[in-house]
Image (cartoon, rainbow, N blue to C red):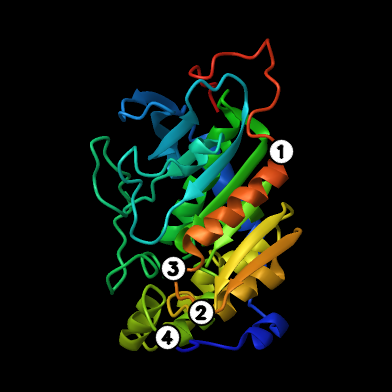
């Protein structure tokens, strides 16, 4: 597989000048205040997965407009004190899946919240999260859904869901609210960067081959979906480029990442035709907090795979310390969540 974009040296030197809306902060402040005002209480229902070393709960969190967002909470079996926590967002087209499928972080000793992505994936025994908006783009996919206005855009709803999911994790008695790391691959990486810019006080951020960064460049050079959805839309609607890229600037994770302060561990793959490395480096260079980077020069969108999971495990352990701090004898039972 050849290089799909700039060389590593060029990417390391890259400092793109992105168009940032003047009201970006006000837009997101109003969006999140409205979502919180909608109210609602997270719900956690035990699930029997057949696993003995991990306990799992079916999660429902009030997200955008108070709409229910599904997910899973995995805990190490027998955990009896507030834990460091990893909140994970998923890749494009993926739903939360089956409850036993993703238990790495719980096996490492951390609480692990997984957020379903509205309108994506497939129904499980517990159901998934529909996107209730009636808006649709002119091409299949999510990038052009509601693209005529930032108030209507699909990722306004998704990013709000993600912020509310982190807030629910902070209030759960199994979680130490000061030791929360957000992460995700591709779309999940872009969501984690957006959350890092919108939620103060996170302990860490781990975006892998992140999507939704320098979106205009992605639309110009990506050789594979999802960025190609934008090019396909504008191929049909030649007069709407200004409107489209103005709307997408409100959900560009490279812009929101500049507001982040938590330590971060990025991964970028130099032969990635889905999320071209220059777009990922745009977010890395603009990131506002301390940052570290792993580059996989000969990989595509699969990135570092299991090798990078090993890097993440070591990084989180160094960042958060022991997964299980000294128990607080006055702490409440972990299966009794507090309302957000």
SS category of the residue bearing label 1: loop
Q: Counting residues from the N terminus, which is met first, the one under dot 2 or under dot 4?
A: 4
Which residue is identified by label 1? 321
Question: Gap between marks 3 and 1, in whole Å?
Answer: 28 Å
Question: Gap between marks 2 and 4, in whole Å?
Answer: 8 Å
Query: Percent x, y for residue 167?
Result: 57, 37
How many other residues sit within 10 Å of disc 2, few (<14), some (14-19) or many (≥20)? some
Question: Gap between marks 4 and 3, in whole Å?
Answer: 13 Å
Question: Gap between marks 4 and 1, in whole Å?
Answer: 39 Å
Q: Quick check: can you spot residue 131?
A: yes
- CB-based contact (under 8 Å), mark 3 and mark 1: no
Depth check, front residue: 301 or 223: 301
Q: Residue 103 lies in what quarter of the image? A: top left
Which residue is identified by label 2? 298
Which residue is identified by label 3? 302
Q: Could you tell me which residue is drawn at 40 percent across and 33 percent down? A: 60
- CB-based contact (under 8 Å), mark 2 and mark 4: yes
Question: Gap between marks 3 and 2, in whole Å?
Answer: 10 Å
Depth check, front residue: 330 or 269: 269
- CB-based contact (under 8 Å), mark 4 and mark 1: no
Which residue is identified by label 4? 1
């Amino acid at each position: 597989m050849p290089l799909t974009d700039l060389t590593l040296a060029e990417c390391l030197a890259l400092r793109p000048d992105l168009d940032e809306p003047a009201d970006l902060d006000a837009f997101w402040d109003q969006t999140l205040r409205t979502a919180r005002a909608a109210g609602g209480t997270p719900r956690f229902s035990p699930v029997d997965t057949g696993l003995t070393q991990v306990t799992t709960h079916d999660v429902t969190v009030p997200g955008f407009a108070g709409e229910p967002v599904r997910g899973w909470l995995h805990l190490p079996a027998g955990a009896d004190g507030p834990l460091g926590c990893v909140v994970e967002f998923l890749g494009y087209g993926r739903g939360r899946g089956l409850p036993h499928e993703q238990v790495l972080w719980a096996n490492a000793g951390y609480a692990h919240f997984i957020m379903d992505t509205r309108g994506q994936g497939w129904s499980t025994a517990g159901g998934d999260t529909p996107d209730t908006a009636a808006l649709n783009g002119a091409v299949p996919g999510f990038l052009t859904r509601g693209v005529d206005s930032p108030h209507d855009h699909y990722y306004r709803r998704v990013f709000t869901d993600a912020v509310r999911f982190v807030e629910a994790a902070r209030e759960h008695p199994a979680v130490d609210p000061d030791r929360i790391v957000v992460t995700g691959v591709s779309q999940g990486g872009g969501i984690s960067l957006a959350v890092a810019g919108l939620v103060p006080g996170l302990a860490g951020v781990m975006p892998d081959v992140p999507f939704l960064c320098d979106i205009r460049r992605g639309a110009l050079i990506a050789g594979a979906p999802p960025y190609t959805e934008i090019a396909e839309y504008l191929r049909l609607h030649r007069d709407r480029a200004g409107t489209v890229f103005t709307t997408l600037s409100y959900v560009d994770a490279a812009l929101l990442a500049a507001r982040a302060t938590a330590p971060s561990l990025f991964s970028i793959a130099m032969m990635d035709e889905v999320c071209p490395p220059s777009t990922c480096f745009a977010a890395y260079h603009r990131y506002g907090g301390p940052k570290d980077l792993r580059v996989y020069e000969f990989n595509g969108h699969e990135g570092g795979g299991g090798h990078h999971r090993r890097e993440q495990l070591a990084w989180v352990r160094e960042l958060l310390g022991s997964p299980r701090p000294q128990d607080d004898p006055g702490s409440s039972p972990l299966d009794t969540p507090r309302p957000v």
